Amino acid sequence: MADDFHKPTLFGGREFEAFEGAAPDPAVTRRIAHDTARGLVARVRESGDPEVLDRVVGFTDEHGLDAVAELWARSSPRSLPGALWRVYLLRTMIRQDLAGVALLFQRGTEVLRTIDPLVAGAPSPAGPDEVLDLSDRILRGVFDGDLADALERAAAFCRVEAAGAASVADDQDAASPERSSELTTRAARLATIAEELAVCARMARDDSLD
């Protein structure tokens, strides 16, 4: 089974057949997204193979985010494939700008008056290495831990990061309006992802996330 994860998709080629050519059938696309998401989580959990888990966690590092996007980016945000897409997207965002993400996360921990920094699970202060480690631990938790807990941690991370981005945006408003606008947009997007992941976490606890 482990050989499947050497291929440039999470499962192999057949899941992508529906995406080849023009205008794939939306119903088929949805079915494949849900089937692959369920199948991936189940297979990694059942394998108990640390190497398989490592390859799944690091999949987008080698093959890029587009391979995951093809399968899951169009899925409902309140679904298992939608949740997996957002966690992979979050991890990629973190890895692309470790220093910047760490700065915003640290600011978020300073301005938030909630338990989100504790739920996310990063130490304080959290530098680039700590934030990178957290992103890997969250994704690992999806596949070898409690799914609801992992999604709650991802949601909490997004809320902290959003708070940090909004705070820095306020600081930059006069000196750099364009940068302030970018950070405000980023904060809004992260807040949306946080809410979507929180809903998925509740659904996972109810065993209704599919």
Image (cartoon, rainbow, N blue to C red):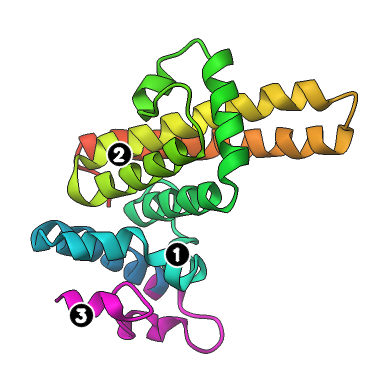
- Vertical relation: 154 (above or below) 96: above
Residue indicated by mark 1:
61
| Residue 54 showing in the rendered view | yes
| Residue 203 showing in the rendered view | no
Which label is found at residue 150? Answer: 2
Range drawn in magenta: 1-28
**Is 84 placed left or right of 210 in the picture?**
right
Which is closer to the viewer, label 2 or label 1? 1
Q: Earlier in the sequence, mark 1 or mark 3?
A: 3
Q: Secondary structure at mark 3?
A: helix
Q: Position of residue 119 (x, y in %)?
A: 35, 24
Residue indicated by mark 3:
3
Q: CA distance from mark 1 to mark 3?
A: 18 Å
Q: Position of residue 53 (x, y in %)?
A: 23, 59
Q: Residue at x 46, y 38 (%)?
A: 131
Q: Residues within 10 Å of mark 3 (few under 14, many from 20)?
A: few
User: In the image, what residue type sits under mark 1?
Assistant: Asp
Q: Residue at x 90, y 27 (%)?
A: 175
Q: Residue at x 71, y 25 (%)?
A: 168
Q: Secondary structure at mark 2?
A: helix
Which is closer to the viewer, label 2 or label 3? 3
User: In the image, what residue type sits under mark 2?
Assistant: Ala
- Vertical relation: 113 (above or below) 171: above
Q: CA distance from mark 2 to mark 3?
A: 26 Å
Q: Position of residue 52 (x, y in %)?
A: 21, 65
Q: Residue at x 77, y 21 (%)?
A: 170
Q: CA distance from mark 2 to mark 1?
A: 20 Å
